[in-house]
Image (cartoon, rainbow, N blue to C red):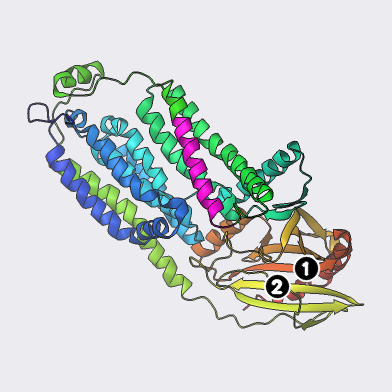
């Protein structure tokens, strides 16, 4: 039978009977005010296999706090006004994220409100005891998908290297590689991001439970981050070899995903087994017997608890400060509703360029929720394809900067190279472009794209988001757009550059007229 210590009236400090109900009331208010953020988090847990572990985070946090209930009961709750600064910071972060439609930081700020509220209402001493359980809430936030691209590249590079080491010829193109018996792509599902996130969540909890010194914990967490990345590279190489050696009868369908999870399970168990060899002696469980001794050792006498009025004042202050963010967000939504109606088409050709003609090429960018325009311009036997994605307003799932938006169809084409530079314009000016080379069958294409937000151009998605926040807070309502122009080439991307550079110099002012209400 499990023997859990129980807090009694003999060692229970004053103040809890007031602080706990007020804390519960404050959580209810936060849940109502930030309902959109919290419900979105749960919906992502439900639909995404990468973040299904989120359902376990709250029970784990609750259990870790429950284990400390006797120790906590001996400490007197004392409101900490200084923590209101963090409430303000979280509220500002949530509001800016809402204005920029950055879901991950919006959700992070909403979740951070809970541990900060603990600090405000219960004080520093109690919050220190709960530092890990409260900090572990970060794994409830569904974030980490920004690792997908880099992990795909690492996995592709590792697989190619391992194939070459084992004597198999490889032709490598970005995230695609070809061996004599077949071709492979490191898709998003093969990036290993779900292994990485799950390993970090499990490894961090394991380090806390098994080790007591900070350096051992940090080392094990670092190992938990490195091992799944290396293991995923080995897994990908194993999938290729199984397919290659079995004449593509094995590891080519859903079975390679099953094989991946089995392999990941073995790797994690091995990592935990090795970690157990270095486990440290667990500290004596806190109980009624050593309660007073521990408090004295830390110099934390309970003393007299603040009055109920003090708890109420600081609870109201913290909660009001937190919910001011959704209140301001409602005002921003009202301003957004006043955005002008946009009905323009691509501007007519100038400076010798004719068009726009219907774009009959196979090139198909995709920006979800945008007002899209496509066309082709021609001059002296040269042709340039143009794509415009315009957003009069921003909303979740219909935003300029989104991981799902792309300037080409990844299922039909493969990325060969990327770069950024500035195109010279008349009168000594320059224009920033992001260049992407793609290949589809025997056809190669060079794509230049950039963002324009409130009249400012950039290729940096973070800067574009910052421009959007500025415009949203100032209620400018000028809209945001993504421009992409492209041209085909046969041998080198330089062939397409000779078409795109003159087009930008000749047509940029006309293109910009297309996004003016």
Q: Which residue is mark 2?
A: 387
Identify the image quadrant of residue 465: bottom right
Q: Magenta: predominant secondary structure element?
A: helix
The quadrant of the image that shows the N terminus is top left
Element type at mark 2 = strand
The single residue placed furthest to the left in the displayed view is 9
| Residue 410 visible in this rendered orientation of the protein | yes
Q: How far apart are the alpha carbons under marks 2 and 1? A: 9 Å
CB-based contact (under 8 Å), mark 2 and mark 1: yes
Magenta region includes residue 269: yes
- Residue range (magenta): 253-272
Q: Nearer the viewer, residue 408 or 508?
A: 408
Answer left or right for 230 relative to 487. Answer: left
Q: Which residue is mark 1?
A: 486
Magenta region includes residue 425: no
Residue drawn at x 29%, y 56% is: 31
Residues packed near mark 2 inside 10 Å, few (<14), some (14 to 19) or many (20 plus): many
Answer left or right for 432 relative to 88. Answer: right
Q: Nearer the viewer, residue 489 or 402?
A: 489
């Amino acid at each position: 039978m499990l023997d859990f210590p129980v807090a009694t009236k003999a060692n229970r400090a004053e103040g809890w009977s007031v602080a706990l109900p007020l804390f519960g009331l404050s959580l209810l208010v936060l849940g109502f005010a930030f309902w959109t953020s919290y419900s979105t988090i749960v919906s992502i847990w439900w639909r995404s296999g990468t973040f299904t572990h989120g359902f376990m985070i709250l029970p784990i946090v609750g259990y870790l706090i429950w284990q400390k209930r006797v120790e906590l009961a001996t400490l007197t709750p004392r409101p900490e006004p200084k923590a209101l600064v963090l409430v303000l910071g979280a509220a500002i972060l949530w509001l800016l994220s809402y204005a920029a439609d950055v879901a991950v930081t919006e959700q992070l700020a909403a979740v951070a409100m809970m541990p900060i509220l603990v600090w405000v209402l219960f004080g520093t001493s109690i919050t220190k005891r709960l530092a890990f359980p409260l900090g572990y809430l970060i794994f409830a936030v569904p974030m980490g998908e920004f690792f997908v691209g880099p992990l795909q590249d690492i996995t592709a590079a590792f697989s190619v290297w391992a194939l070459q080491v084992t004597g198999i010829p490889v032709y490598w193109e970005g995230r695609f590689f070809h061996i004599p018996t077949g071709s492979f792509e490191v898709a998003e599902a093969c990036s290993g991001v779900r292994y990485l996130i799950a390993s970090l969540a499990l490894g961090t909890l394991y380090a806390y439970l098994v080790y007591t010194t900070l350096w051992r914990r940090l080392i094990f967490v670092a190992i938990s981050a490195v091992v799944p990345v290396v293991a995923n590279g080995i897994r990908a190489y194993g999938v290729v070899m199984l397919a290659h050696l079995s004449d593509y009868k094995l590891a080519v369908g859903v079975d390679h995903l099953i094989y991946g999870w089995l392999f990941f399970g073995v790797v994690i168990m091995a990592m935990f087994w090795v970690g157990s060899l270095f486990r440290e002696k667990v500290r004596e469980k806190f109980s009624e017997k050593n309660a007073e001794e521990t408090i004295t050792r830390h110099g934390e006498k309970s003393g007299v608890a603040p009055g109920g009025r003090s708890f109420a004042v600081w609870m109201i202050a913290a909660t009001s400060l937190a919910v001011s963010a959704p209140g301001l967000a409602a005002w921003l939504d009202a301003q957004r509703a006043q955005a002008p109606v946009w009905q323009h088409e691509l501007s007519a050709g100038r400076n010798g360029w004719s068009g726009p003609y219907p774009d009959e090429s196979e090139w198909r960018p995709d920006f979800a929720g945008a007002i899209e325009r496509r066309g082709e311009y021609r001059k002296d036997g040269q042709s340039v394809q143009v794509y415009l994605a315009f957003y009069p307003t921003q909303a979740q799932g219909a935003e300029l900067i989104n991981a799902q938006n792309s300037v080409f169809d990844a299922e039909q084409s493969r990325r060969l190279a990327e770069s950024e530079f500035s195109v010279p314009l008349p009168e000594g000016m320059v224009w920033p472009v992001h260049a992407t080379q793609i290949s589809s069958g025997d056809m190669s294409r060079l794509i230049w794209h950039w963002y324009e937000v409130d009249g400012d151009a950039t290729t940096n998605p973070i800067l574009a988001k910052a421009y959007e926040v500025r415009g949203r807070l100032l209620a400018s309502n000028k809209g945001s757009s993504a421009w992409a122009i492209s041209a085909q080439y046969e041998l080198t991307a330089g062939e397409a550059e000779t078409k795109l550079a003159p087009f930008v110099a000749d047509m940029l002012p006309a293109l910009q007229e297309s996004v003016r209400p």
